[in-house]
Image (cartoon, rainbow, N blue to C red):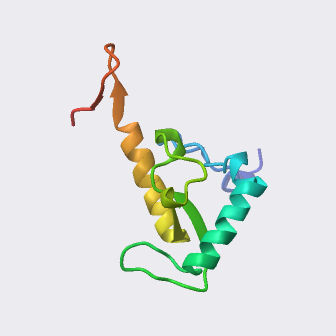
Amino acid sequence: MPPALRNLAPRIRLLETRTAKPPVKVALPFYLVPEWRALMNRLIEKRGRRCEAKGCGRTNCRIFGDHIVELQDGGALFDESNVQLLCGSHHTAKTAASRAARLAKRHVCDGEERPIDP
């Protein structure tokens, strides 16, 4: 091999295998049905297009309809009292916290859920 070629840096980056990334969150098809869209339109008309997170009140941004009690935790699908309007950052933070709380639990043989000891 010619000496000039030995000095070229490799162009292929090494794959980072020390960390595992969570799967990408995909919106459930439920959020595309006409009933959900109608509920969101009613809530935005009634409450206004603003973030309902405590101390936020952001307006003029994308608003997400967020189930207070998430569907995976037994929340009601179309109950207005179970839906809050959140800006993107508060929706992401609330969803991540709910997911972390759900993952922190484990199922025990007797069917009772207990938190994992640190």
x, y percent for residue 117: 21, 33
Q: Quadrant of the N terminus?
A: top right
Q: Residue furthest top?
A: 109
Q: Residue at x 61, y 53 (%)?
A: 78
Q: Residue at x 70, y 48 (%)?
A: 30
Query: In this image, 5 relative to 17: left or right?
Result: right
* Nearer to the camera, 74 or 88: 74
* Nearer to the camera, 110 or 116: 110
x, y percent for residue 116: 27, 32
Q: Residue at x 46, y 40 (%)?
A: 73
* Nearer to the camera, 6 or 83: 83
Is 29 situated above or below 59? above
Q: Can residue 62 be seen at all in this image of the molecule?
A: no
x, y percent for residue 82: 49, 56
Count how many numbered circles sit on residues in the image: 0
Is 61 situated above or below 68? below
Q: Quadrant of the C terminus?
A: top left
Q: Residue furthest left?
A: 118
Query: In this image, 111 relative to 64: left or right?
Result: left
Q: Residue at x 60, y 81 (%)?
A: 61
Is 57 situated above or below 12? below
x, y percent for residue 62: 63, 75
Query: In this image, 66 relative to 3: left or right?
Result: left
Q: Residue furthest bottom?
A: 60
Q: Can residue 111 be seen at all in this image of the molecule?
A: yes
